[in-house]
């Protein structure tokens, strides 16, 4: 009886079959995936600001400044901002609030201000922008 010789080669045909099946699966699944898109507002077409709104300014260092309807501004922290917003809401139901973030302010600081305003019960909240 003759002895069999061992082959030192790898049979790649099954690997090619698996790769082709995976390729087909990815080709079918890729168009079904939805990518997130961000529609940023254009500054040139911004809406007209509401008349006499409350303003919350976020400085470059993250400091919050509350500006009331009379134009009086004061630097506040989160707790003071919540108290001032509650007092203003007691005077006028659902006033408009604009958040003016400095160009170099951290995104996190602006979002923190927006969260605090929303938590105070305001629904008319917007971001203030400057026209070009």
Image (cartoon, rainbow, N blue to C red):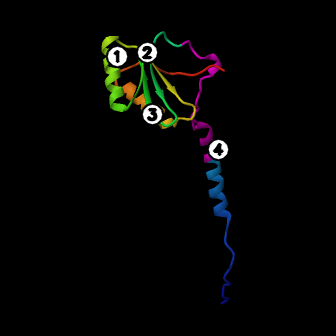
Whether label 3 touches label 4, CB < 8 Å: no
Q: Quadrant of the C terminus?
A: top right
Give the structural element (helix, strand or loop) at label 4: helix
Mark positioned earlier in the residue sequence (1 or 4): 4
Residue 9 lies, with reference to residue 87, above or below; the image says below
Between label 3 and label 4, give the one nearer the viewer.
3
Span shown in magenta:
25-48
| Camera-nearest residue between 131 and 39 | 131
Q: Residues within 10 Å of mark 1 (few under 14, many from 20)?
A: some
| Camera-nearest residue between 24 and 116 | 116
Between label 2 and label 3, give the one nearer the viewer.
3
Mark positioned earlier in the residue sequence (3 or 4): 4
Give the structural element (helix, strand or loop) at label 1: helix
Could you say which disc has been placed on residue 27 in the image?
4
Mark positioned earlier in the residue sequence (3 or 1): 3
Reading the image, the residue beneath label 3 is: 63
Reading the image, the residue beneath label 1 is: 88
Q: Is residue 43 magenta?
A: yes
Whether label 1 touches label 4, CB < 8 Å: no
């Amino acid at each position: 009886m003759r002895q069999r010789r061992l082959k030192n080669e790898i049979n790649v045909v099954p690997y090619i079959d698996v790769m082709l099946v995976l390729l087909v699966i990815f080709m079918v699944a890729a168009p079904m995936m939805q990518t997130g898109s961000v529609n940023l507002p254009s500054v040139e077409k911004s809406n007209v600001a509401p008349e006499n709104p409350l303003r919350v300014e976020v400085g470059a260092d993250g400091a919050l400044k509350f500006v009331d309807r009379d134009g009086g501004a004061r630097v506040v922290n989160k707790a003071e901002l919540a108290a001032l917003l509650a007092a203003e809401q007691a005077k006028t139901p659902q006033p408009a609030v604009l958040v003016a973030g400095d160009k170099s302010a951290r995104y996190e600081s602006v979002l923190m201000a927006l969260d605090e305003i929303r938590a105070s019960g305001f629904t008319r909240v917007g971001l203030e922008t400057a026209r070009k």
